[in-house]
């Protein structure tokens, strides 16, 4: 029952995360301005939530590690969405479990097994499809930034894995750092119409604040592998929403890469869960 509740929380987080690609595409702002504004809204909401539940902010090396990963994933995700397709961004970010293998070896001396190495090879084959396609479509920079987002996302999944870690503190501090460093870019924007403001509110309230509250609650109940498996719905929903409402389609080669990445990661996580 406890794990079922945790899976539900992570699933809700993934559904809310999936609106990010569409909202970032329709907001006529620079990616750093979007990131600053949405993080400012989110950190206010999460701060109120922490006050309500009487949760004290903890500051220590594991928390700061999670905060830096949090800052990286929000910033790189926004930038990548403006430089490449939403599908490329979210699928390449979904490589996070593969980078988590490296982090587990680096921090916990958990050596990768044959299945880990095989999955990494498969995933990097999928990534190669994106980069070959990016060279011809001019999206190579965006695809590279999306990979960096995946590296940081791996750290987010590990926020509760270290001794004396606290995911809520990492989320709050990380979003505060993003808001403080990026909010100044908003002053360079001129379009504050309904589309821009509606998108920013949706990102700040739902795609960041509520989503990461759900994620933190979920990570308290389920292990990182189960959490990463549950978020597999995001790279499916995200490009569908963008295709339906923004009419941005994924190229055939990138589609092949997406299938390779998503299927490889899901099969790997199912095997680990068993």
Image (spheres, rainbow, N blue to C red):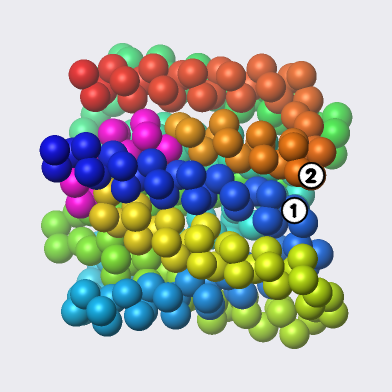
Q: Is residue 168 magenta?
A: no
Secondary structure of residue under mark 2? helix
Query: Which span is picked out in magenta?
Result: 219-231
Q: Quadrant of residue 227?
A: top left
199 relative to 8, above or below: below
Q: Is residue 109 visible?
A: no
Secondary structure of residue under mark 1? helix
Residue identifier under label 1 = 25
Quadrant for the C terminus in the image: top left
Q: CA distance from mark 1 to mark 2?
A: 8 Å
User: Residue shown at 33%/25% (left/top)?
Assistant: 269
Between 128 and 221, the residue placed more toward the observer is: 221
The secondary structure that dominates the magenta segment is helix
Between 262 and 54, the residue placed more toward the observer is: 54
Residue 147 placement (x, y as % from top left)? 57, 42
Residue 148 placement (x, y as % from top left)? 55, 47
> Left or right: 66 with respect to 18?
left
Quadrant for the N terminus in the image: top left
Between 8 and 84, the residue placed more toward the observer is: 8
27 relative to 117, above or below: below
User: Residue shown at 61%/24% (left/top)?
Assistant: 258
Residue identifier under label 2 = 246
Q: Quadrant of residue 245?
A: top right
Residue 63 placement (x, y as % from top left)? 28, 66
């Amino acid at each position: 029952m406890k794990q079922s509740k945790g899976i539900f929380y992570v699933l809700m987080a993934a559904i809310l995360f999936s609106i990010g690609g569409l909202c970032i595409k329709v907001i006529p702002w620079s990616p750093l301005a979007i990131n600053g504004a949405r993080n400012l809204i989110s950190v206010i909401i999460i701060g109120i939530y922490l006050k309500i539940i009487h949760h004290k902010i903890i500051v220590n090396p594991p928390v700061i590690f999670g905060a830096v990963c949090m800052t990286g994933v929000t910033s790189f995700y926004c930038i990548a969405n403006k430089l490449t397709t939403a599908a490329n961004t979210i699928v390449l970010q979904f490589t996070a479990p593969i980078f988590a293998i490296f982090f587990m070896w680096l921090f916990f001396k958990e050596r990768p097994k044959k299945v880990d190495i095989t999955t990494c090879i498969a995933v990097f084959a999928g990534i190669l499809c994106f980069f070959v396609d990016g060279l011809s479509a001019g999206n190579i920079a965006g695809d590279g930034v999306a990979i960096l987002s995946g590296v940081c996302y791996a750290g987010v999944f590990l926020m509760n894995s270290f001794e004396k870690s606290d995911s809520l503190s990492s989320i709050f501090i990380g979003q505060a750092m993003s808001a403080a460093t990026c909010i100044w870019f908003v002053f360079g924007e001129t379009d504050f119409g309904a589309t821009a403001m509606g998108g920013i509110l949706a990102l700040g309230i739902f795609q960041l604040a509520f989503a990461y509250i759900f994620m933190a609650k979920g990570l308290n109940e389920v292990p990182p592998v189960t959490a990463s498996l549950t978020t597999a719905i995001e790279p499916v929903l995200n490009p569908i929403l963008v295709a339906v409402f923004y009419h941005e389609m994924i190229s055939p080669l990138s589609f092949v890469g997406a299938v390779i990445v998503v299927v490889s990661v899901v099969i790997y996580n199912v095997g680990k869960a068993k």
